[in-house]
Amino acid sequence: MNTEFDLSDPDKKLASIRDKVLLLSFGRLGLFLLMLVLLVVGISEIHWLLILFFPVTFVFVSLILKFNKEKDREAFYKAVKEMNENRVKRKNRELKEFDSGLEFMDSAHPFSSDLDLFGTHSLFQMINHTVSRGGKALLANWLKTPLAPKKAAEKQQALFELSSKKDFIFIFEAFGKAFMKKDNATDGKAKFYAWLKNSQPWHSLYFLPMVLGPIVGLIVLFGALYSVFSTLYLSIFILVGMGLLGLIFKPLMEAMKALPNDNDLKTLQAWAKLLEKEQFENPLLLKHQTPLKQKDFLASKALKQLESLTFLVENRTNMLYLIFNLLFWVDFYVLYRLKKWNELAGQNMREWEETFENWEALVSLASFIEEEELSTKVNWTAEFSFSGEAIRHPLIAPKTCVANNFSLKENEKVVLLTGSNMSGKTTFMRTLGINLVLAGMGVPPFAKSFSTGPFLLYTSMRNTDSLGESVSSFYAELARIKGVLEKAAAGEPVFYLLDEILKGTNTADRVLGSEALIRQLAKTQAKGIISTHDIELSTLEKELPFLVNYSFHHDIKKDEIVFDYTIKKGSCPNFNAQKLMELMGIKIENAS
């Protein structure tokens, strides 16, 4: 397949291609009717016309190939058009139409359920450009599994190089969107790999019909047509052929059921060709390119051969194939080609598939970096500290997103975050968390600068009741906090984000429990942020040197509460719950 495409004006290209497709459709229909006439008249009346049947068939097949090529180009440019539209939607944070990746949500995971990584209006919807199930699952796993600092830094360098190859990553994705079958069922892959393991039932005696079939078929056909000998010989030849073809009918049917969809193979072949000719410098990119460039053969060539064989096998019930098969015993040639292909390249297919899944995920991250114009390099430090300048939330539209500066020095362990309702506490904590997730994947964070130690991220934000497990939200929160405490006690460098701590109990118990938790966490290497409405806890800053107060404020102007969503040092001077209740119609009377 051609991998050189002009991406400048897909609408114009589509109009031109559709005109060609229409002409080729009429031409193909005309030739097919001519073939029928030549076949019928040649057999019944004018035998020499059958000589013309074969060159006309050749032209007909050429037109089919040309038609398929134009349809492929049409599918490609339709994908380009869709991708351009999706790019605008992601830029405007209109994400509802994108795959949410909800199946990867895991409430037991240390942070994925709290940071909008999956679900409606999620990071996965922003970042996912994959088309296969395997690529999608791998990308989701990368989101949930942060790399060690050294590997994250190495991966970021690879992604910077890949994101600079704009045409490459765009065309790579377009091929997948144009041709990859959407359901991409895993049971089909299992059948294919099982078929590869079983050697094709080829016997040396099969060479005889494979070679003699076309030769004898031509002799008998033309001999019967020109009355050199009786048509009975042609009938006998066809009957003998049906018997011989019956010997290999079962293995070819098994191949038909097991071979991948030809469109999937078309995608893999195009990806291989793209990757083989692309020049990379980064060691990680070269590592993922190597499996496709073997010494003896290229993956694109092997996949192209398998695509052609799959096309033949899938079209064995086609009328034209049936005619040629009865006359020339083509099935023997197809089975032999399948056997030889499996011996040459079959053992490489699983490695190639895993390689392509890695490239899907890498291209997704590189496309995300390119679209969002991310360029901040993460400064990984050995110290347990954190600092960031102009940190933004990826899922909030840039025009409305308020950036914040924040730092947590090595001697500071607990940030107590206070603020009124809707002032931005939870969003800020999620902003830090989701940018730490990006950094752990090797993706530049949404910040002007970003420096962090080797932390393990843990969160407790969205704790809900579970009727199926008879678990209250308060118990669920305690279970999350227990996980943080266990990791911290084991000496792990935990970075925790605990939102509205112990909110499921009364004020006195909440303040008492919160103080105890703060003191217990401070004895470990753990650091993090605890948000609360209990302003009493902010007085702990005077007696606990490891605790610092931060807050979000608001102003009340007439009947409106105004927020600036900017984090400030110190505790919150006022809260807005009473004013909010008044605005909602709840009349609060002062006690006499």
Image (cartoon, helix red, strand yellow):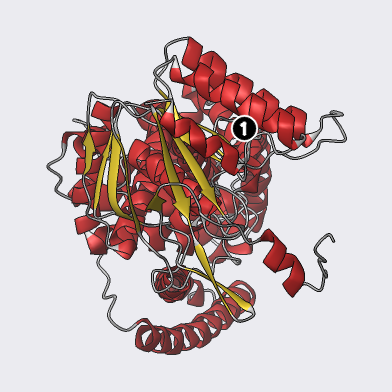
**Residue at 42% across / 89% down in the picture?**
15
Crowdedness near tag 1: few (<14), some (14–19) or many (≥20) residues, C-alpha within 10 Å: some
Q: Percent position (x, y) of residue 373?
A: 27, 62
- Image position of 166 with respect to 434: above or below: below
Give percent across and percent down for residue 569: 37, 48
Residue 185 lies, in percent from the top left, at 63, 43
Q: Nearer the viewer, residue 322 or 278?
A: 278
Left or right placement of residue 514 versus residue 302 in this view:
right
State the residue position of label 1.
Answer: 191
Say whether residue 58 is visible.
no
Task: Specify whether residue 476 is in view.
Answer: yes
Decide: is 301 above or below 386.
below
Q: Residue at x 63, y 76 (%)?
A: 40
Q: Nearer the viewer, residue 40 or 434?
A: 434
Question: Number of numbered discs present?
Answer: 1
Q: Nearer the viewer, residue 22 or 369?
A: 369
Residue at coordinates 68% horizontally, 24% vertically from top-left?
479
Foreground of the two, 254 or 178? 178
Residue 140, given in percent of the width and then of the height, sits at: 51, 41
Quadrant of the rendered structure where residue 474 is?
A: top right
Q: Where, by quadrant of the figure, is residue 414 drawn?
A: top left
Relative to residue 385, is residue 558 drawn left or right? right
SS at badge 1: helix
Dot 1 amino acid type:
Lys
User: Looking at the figure, which quarter contains the N terminus?
Assistant: bottom left
* Residue most extreme to the top: 490
